[in-house]
């Protein structure tokens, strides 16, 4: 939920840290702060609001030093105020910490420390870390961090500095992500890769429980049992451009436009010689034969990809699939055992509910497979198998290219299972693969077809509510389309199975209510059209997203988009694109910060 950046080296820590925090704004943006250790003191500045507020404050108070820590916050414990912003300092002001995660036992620790005479300024869980560090500090920061770590329950990635050891920086990773970059003249640690890219490509993905002790110009990594360990240095292949706007006004529209090339790249890697080939990422024929049911578990947009995945796997591979929200799955006492395969979908691979659900599935001895965009993420390390989306960094809070690449991977997985289990004939298998390969060009055409969408977006910008309707796969797309619109435009948007309207919802339709109807499925178009007629006769303004060249649709709709042709089963990959554009243009028409909608964060690492 929050992002941290720590630096030690020859450059001005303030500049490196602010630059790194800018790249983490997708993780939270309701307050930010920085602290540096210099000349026997810790200087700090922190501000509620966007990072620009902190930057302004730093113009007045240009703190400088060669070792420092920074934080960008998405409030969980305590409101977004200056005082609750990180870094948090110990009572004597000689130790400072930034923290991403949650300290679950902070209340008990706070009571204990208060009884011992320590005081607290903030309502955060993090401040207990700073105070514990002071309690345990005896001229050795590493020892104080170790003792503090033993007392903490929860998830925490931290950067820690001490005024008494200004040549030292410590990083600590328990559950929450932390990557460690090796620069020519220094070291940088951050919650995610984009903060590092400007400075280095050489990165260590710290393991759960690791401590990094940077002293002078060298560093030592200790594992959870305090043993010295060496971790593999990996080369990051992304370009800096991949994590910057690259001429677009916003990350969301850049990422919408990147979907064609992203799908193309995914197919290039995961399809070889006319065959789906996940290499180690999938299960063998023998392993699949022992599976009698599949669960797909995820949150938000990734869950919506799962709804399409259920349909694809059931239709193509003929295995029964239950799709569940990670936050529900964990408490539903799911019926899983060693014959169950649980497929997790997570762009970040760090979503707390999904990660905990993965652990539950593993405890119950199910086989697990992850579809993710983030190599070496926590879920990637823990799942039995992983399949990657190769979409490049997704920075906008609203997920777009991660969704379409997740869909493509789910179709490929359905094909992989079906061919291994002999549940599809060669011709049908090849036919679906061929059509998938034609999609990148169709997606490229579709992202440019935005005139009618821009016009309708302006019209709906001041509406209080909107409805998406569809049947079958179009209903699954409607659910994702509705989430996209509501999260970035703040218009109350609901998706309804078109056939359900008359069982209650139609009472919400009045003169001028916008309804977007998705109609791509041959066997369902006529039925959905009847539902469109029902809402039109009650005053709805209708926008159609359709694959059909059908006069009836044009006549009844106020505006429409015609999708390029593909197989019915593959339409979710195309029909979501106009919906993403609709969300983007409505949000920008309303002047909303589309990449950072209110109350949200990109990576949801709290339950
Ligand atoms: O990183 P994940 O795919 O696990 O994230 C899941 C959801 O938080 C995410 O898809 C969220 O719903 C997006 N903001 C939707 O655009």
Image (cartoon, rainbow, N blue to C red):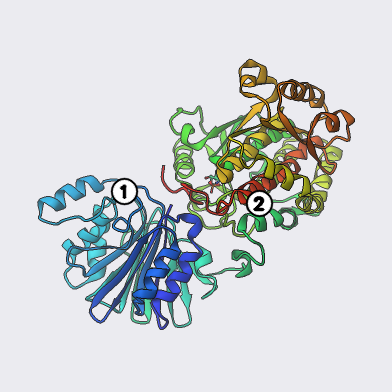
Which quadrant is home to the C terminus? Answer: top left
Q: Nearer the viewer, residue 297 or 562?
A: 562
| Nearest to viewer (mark 2 / mark 1) | 1
The residue at label 1 has a CB less than 8 Å from ligand 1:
no
Q: Residue at image x 70%, y 57%?
A: 258
Between the C-alphas of marks 2 and 1, the distance is 33 Å
Give x and y (percent) for residue 498.
70, 24
Nearer the N terminus, badge 2 or badge 1? 1
Above or below 411: residue 324: above
The x and y percentages for residue 599 are 46, 46
What residue is shown with label 2?
401
- Residue at image x 72%, y 39%? 572
Q: Mark 1 points at which residue?
A: 78
CB at disc 2 and ligand 1 closer than 8 Å: no
Percent of width and height locating residue 96? 27, 66
Q: Is residue 186 left or right of residue 404?
A: left
Residue 159 seen from this side: no
Would residue 150 be found to the left or right of residue 373 on screen? left
Any mark on residue 426, and which?
none
**Res. 239 image quadrant:** bottom right
- Please, is residue 56 above or below residue 442 in the view? below
Is the residue marked by circle 2 packed among few (<14), some (14-19), or many (20+) residues within 10 Å?
Answer: many
């Amino acid at each position: 939920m929050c992002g941290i950046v720590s630096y030690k080296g020859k450059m001005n820590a303030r500049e490196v840290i602010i630059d790194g925090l800018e790249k983490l704004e997708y993780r939270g943006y309701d307050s930010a702060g920085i602290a540096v250790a210099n000349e026997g003191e810790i200087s700090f500045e922190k501000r509620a609001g966007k990072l620009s507020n902190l930057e302004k404050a730093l113009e007045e108070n240009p703190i400088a030093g060669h070792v420092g820590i920074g934080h960008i916050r998405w409030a969980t414990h305590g409101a977004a105020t200056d005082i609750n912003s990180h870094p948090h300092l110990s009572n004597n002001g000689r130790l400072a910490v930034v923290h991403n995660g949650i300290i679950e036992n902070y209340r008990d620790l706070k009571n204990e420390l208060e009884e011992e005479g320590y005081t607290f300024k903030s309502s955060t869980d993090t401040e207990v870390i700073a105070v514990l560090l002071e309690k345990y500090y005896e001229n050795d920061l590493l020892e104080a961090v170790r003792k503090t770590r033993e007392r903490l329950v929860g998830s925490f990635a931290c950067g820690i500095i001490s005024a008494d050891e200004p040549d030292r920086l410590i990083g600590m990773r328990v559950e929450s992500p932390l990557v460690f970059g090796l620069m020519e003249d220094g070291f940088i640690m951050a919650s995610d890769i984009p903060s590092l890219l400007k400075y280095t490509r050489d990165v260590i993905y710290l393991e759960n429980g690791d401590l990094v002790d940077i002293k002078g110009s060298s560093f030592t990594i200790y594992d959870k049992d305090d043993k010295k360990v060496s971790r593999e240095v990996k080369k990051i292949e992304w370009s800096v451009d991949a994590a910057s706007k690259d001429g677009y006004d916003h990350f969301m529209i850049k990422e919408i436009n990147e979907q064609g090339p992203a799908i193309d790249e995914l197919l290039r890697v995961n399809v070889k010689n006319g065959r789906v080939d996940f290499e180690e990422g999938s299960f063998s024929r023998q392993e699949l034969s022992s599976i009698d049911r599949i669960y797909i578990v995820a949150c938000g947009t990734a869950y919506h990809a799962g709804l399409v995945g259920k349909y694809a796997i059931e239709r193509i591979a003929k295995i029964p699939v239950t799709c569940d929200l990670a936050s529900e799955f964990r408490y539903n006492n799911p019926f899983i055992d060693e014959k169950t395969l649980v497929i997790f979908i997570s762009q970040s691979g760090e979503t707390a509910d999904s990660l905990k659900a993965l652990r539950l599935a593993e405890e119950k001895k199910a086989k697990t497979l992850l579809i993710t965009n983030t190599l070496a993420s926590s879920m990637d390390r823990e799942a039995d198998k992983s399949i990657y989306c190769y979409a490049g960094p997704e920075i906008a809070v609203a997920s777009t290219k991660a969704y379409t690449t997740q869909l493509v991977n789910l179709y490929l997985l359905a094909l992989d299972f079906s061919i291994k289990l002999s549940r599809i004939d060669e011709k049908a298998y090849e036919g679906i693969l061929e059509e998938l390969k034609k999609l990148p060009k169709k997606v490229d055409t579709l992202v440019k077809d935005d005139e009618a969408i821009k016009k309708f977006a302006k019209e709906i910008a001041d509406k209080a509510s909107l409805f998406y309707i569809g049947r079958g796969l179009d209903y699954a797309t409607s659910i994702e389309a509705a989430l996209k619109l509501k999260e970035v435009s703040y218009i109350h948007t609901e998706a309804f199975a078109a056939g359900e309207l008359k069982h209650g919802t139609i009472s919400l339709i009045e003169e001028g209510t916008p309804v977007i109807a998705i109609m791509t499925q041959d066997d369902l178009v006529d039925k959905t059209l009847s539902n469109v007629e029902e809402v039109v006769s009650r005053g709805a303004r209708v926008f159609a997203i359709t694959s059909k060249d059908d006069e009836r649709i044009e006549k009844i709709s106020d505006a429409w988009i015609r999708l390029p042709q593909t197989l019915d089963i593959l339409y979710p990959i195309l029909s979501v694109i106009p919906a993403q554009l609709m969300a983007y243009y409505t949000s920008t028409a309303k002047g909303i910060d589309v990449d950072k909608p209110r109350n949200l964060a990109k990576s949801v690492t709290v339950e």
